[in-house]
Image (tube, rainbow, N blue to C red):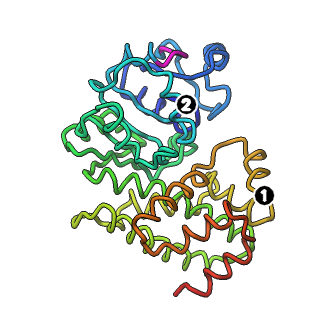
Amino acid sequence: MGGGSWATAIAKILLSTEDSVNWFIRRQDRIDEFRKLGHNPAYLSSVQFDVNRINFYSDINEVVKNSEVLVFVTPSPYFKAHMEKLRTKISDRFIVSAIKGIVPDDNLLMSEYFHRFYGVPEENICVLAGPCHAEEVAMEHLSYLTIGCSNPDNARAFARKMNNRYVKTSVSTDVAGIEFGSVLKNVYAIATGICNGLKYGDNFQAVLMSNALNEMTRFIDTTRPMPERVINDSVYLGDMLVTCYSNFSRNRVFGTMLGKGYSVKAAQLEMEMVAEGYYGTKCMHELNEHYHVDMPILNAMYNIMYEHVAPQMEIKLLTDSFK
C-alpha cells in the first residue's frame, strides 16, 4: 500500500519469496507507466520488476478485497487521507505497518490506530523497522529488518516472507517501543543534519548521538516500560545511527538544508520528498506535553521548525546542556 521508495523496496523483497504481490499505487498514470517501463517511474527506478507478477490497483477497496496481508507504506502525513476512501473492513486482515511516523492530529501510533479505529486485533498487527535504507535494498546490500508483533508466531511468519539472501530478519514483541524509536530517530536525523549544515564536526555529532539515545531511552521507558528491552539493539540504536549518518537519509538532508539557512517550506519544496521527522517532531512534542519527559533535542527541533527560532541559537543552547 504505497508507491514510494520504501514501498518499492519492500515489494522487491517480497517478490524474492512470493510468486506475486498486489500493489496499491494511488495514481493510475503511475501504474500505466510502471507497466510500460518495468520499474517504478518515480522511485528506485534502477529496480526492474517482472510486472506479470504484480497485480496493480489504484482503488484501495479493490486491493483490500483481494488481499489477506496489508503492508502499509504511505507517508504518515497522507495516511488518513488514504484511509478515508476505505470502505472495506480490515479487521479480519493481517496488518503490517512500515510507516515511520505517528497519525497526525490523533497522535496515535499506527498500531494503536489500526486497533482502535478499525478493530484489528493487536496480535494481527505487525510493525516493520530497520536499520534499513530503501536505496541499499535496491542495490541488494546486506540489510537487517526487525518485525514487531505482540504474537511472536505471527511476527516469525511474516519475517519468513522478508528473509532472503540480502535481508536478514529478527522478531520482537516491543511494538510500541519500535514505533516510537522509528519516529524519534527521524527527529534526531534532522538535528544531525542541522548541525552538519552549521559546520559542527564529528566530535560534536558523536555527543549529539549519545544524548539522543539517552533521550529516546527516557521517553520509551517512561511511556512504554518493558524490562527486557535493550535499547542498544539494532532496531533502536542501529536504526537511529543509519538515519542520522547516512547520505540516503532524507531527514538528515532536510536538516542540513535548514542548517544552511533554508526555510522549512523552501527545504520541503526542493526535496520533493517527505521528511517524516518534520511531522514526527510536532506529534512527539504534543505527546510529551502529557508525559513531561526531559527531551531537549526534541524541544530544540520543535523550536526551530515550528517556532522559527534560528538554528544557530537553538543548537548553541544544546551545546551548553550536553555532557
Residue 282 position (above or below residue 221): above
What kind of element bears circle 2? helix
Of callouts 1 and 2, which one flags the residue occurring earlier in the amino acid sequence? 2
Which kind of residue does numbered mark 2 sit on?
A: Ala
Q: Which mark is residue 272?
A: none
Q: Position of residue 41 (x, y in %)?
A: 67, 26
Q: Measuring 79% from the left and 65% from the top, which residue is drawn there?
A: 260
Highlighted magenta segment, given as a residue range: 55-60
Of residues 25 and 205, the one drawn nearer to the viewer in this rendering: 25
Residue 36 position (above or below residue 207): above
Residue depth check, mark 1 versus mark 2: number of the one nearer the observer: 2
Q: Which mark is residue 263?
A: 1
Q: Measuring 61% from the left and 24% from the top, which residue is drawn there?
A: 39
- Distance Cα–Cα, label 1 vs label 2: 26 Å
Q: Position of residue 192 (x, y in %)?
A: 62, 67
What kind of element bears circle 1? loop
Q: Measuring 77% from the left and 45% from the top, which residue is drawn there?
A: 269
**Crowd band around label 1 with a 10 angstrom C-alpha radius: few (<14), some (14–19), many (20+):** some
Q: Quick check: is 76 in the magenta stretch?
A: no
Residue 226 position (above or below residue 84): below
Query: Number of marks in the image?
Result: 2
Q: Position of residue 207 (x, y in %)?
A: 54, 80
Q: Quick check: is 56 in the magenta stretch?
A: yes
Of residues 149 and 105, the one drawn nearer to the viewer in this rendering: 105
Per the image, the residue denoted by label 2 is 81
Residue furthest front in the image:
290
Which kind of residue does numbered mark 1 sit on?
A: Ser
State which quadrant residue 111 falls in: top left
